[in-house]
Image (spheres, rainbow, N blue to C red):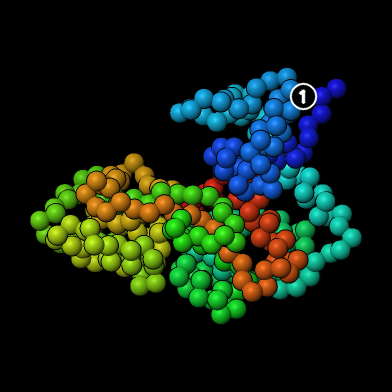
Amino acid sequence: MSKLDIEALRTLCAIVDHGGITRAAENLPLSQSAVSHKIKRLEDNIGCSLLARHSGGPLLTRDGERLLSYARRLCALHDEALQSLSKQPLSGNIRLGMTEDVTSSDLSLILGRFTRLQPDVSVRTHVKQSTILQKELAQGEIDISMMQVFSSEMKSSDILLFRDSLHWVKDIDMELRLDQPVPFLAYDDDCFFKHWAMEDGNLPASGLEIVLQCASSAGIASAVRAGLGVSLLPGRYLTDEMQIIDEAFPPTPELCYVLRLGHNANSRHIQSLANEIAKGVKSRVELQVAS
């Protein structure tokens, strides 16, 4: 009778989460050949192909997609069972900082699950901009930060949750005039999107004129849809009412959502929460935008 190996299932999830065998190997303690071997052995065991193995198309076959759904649930249940049966319960306090756009119902579910598994660990959270969270980490004011950074600014110790694209956008019906200052909808003074946009030397000669500042991505998206101006938004916030106008402005850096740990990174209870968030986010591919 065929059996499913939990580590092979975890490898399949990693291939999908990271966009291929190469990136999966970089995020697993495995070589590329070991990743390929695990998947090949899994395919042989269950008698069907899982990876599509052709460029330009989906990563998984139809059978691979079906198994992926089971794999995520089995891995999560496996890890939860191990944690719940652990003879060394965790205790302590964790200060978690996060940006506004990850305060979604999915993250609440992840934190709720951790609280059930580790009832003696107290987690306190607050919401700030990424630049502020980085300063708080450096000063020892928080233990974990869940935030956005440009891919070029990632640290080797960061835990990558997922990637996103950053786009210049406007409302479909808004007239874009580059012969005069472009009305710009900006996040607040602590936002690195805004600093990058205002400091880039390749802006249109007319420049940008800030007409609105708002710390909320939802608020910026609403102002874009109202036709108040142009803005920079992550791809996960784009809607059918918006038009991407990247060709008229400087190319944008890739955006990464990461977990970054502070001075107490080696503490077991902090490592446990970081692992729980990483697994929970990756099992959903990316957090849903809060409505």
The location of residue 218, given as percent across then percent down, is: 40, 57
Is 90 left or right of 232, judged from the image as shown? Answer: right
* Label 1 crowd bin: few (<14), some (14–19), many (20+), radius 10 Å: some
Q: Is residue 173 visible?
A: yes
The location of residue 151, given as percent across then percent down, is: 46, 55
Front residue of 206/215: it is 206
Q: Is residue 112 visible?
A: no
Tell me the residue at 67%/68% (across/down).
265
Tell me the residue at 51%/56% (across/down).
257
Q: Secondary structure at mark 1?
A: helix
The location of residue 68, given as percent across then percent down, is: 65, 34
Query: Which image quadrant is residue 73 in?
Result: top right
Front residue of 65/219: it is 65
Residue located beneath label 1 in the image: 45
Position of residue 282 relative to residue 61, above or below, is below
Position of residue 195 relative to residue 151, above or below, is below
Q: How many marks?
A: 1
Tell me the residue at 59%/23% (across/down).
62
Q: Amino acid at mark 1?
A: Asn
Query: Which image quadrant is residue 261 in?
Result: bottom right
Is 219 left or right of 78, judged from the image as shown? Answer: left
What is the residue that sits farthest to the top in this orientation?
Answer: 47
Position of the N terminus by quadrant:
top right
Position of residue 135 relative to residue 234, above or below, is below
Tell me the residue at 62%/48% (across/down).
27
What is the residue that sits farthest to the right in this orientation?
Answer: 87
The location of residue 210, given as percent across then percent down, is: 24, 67
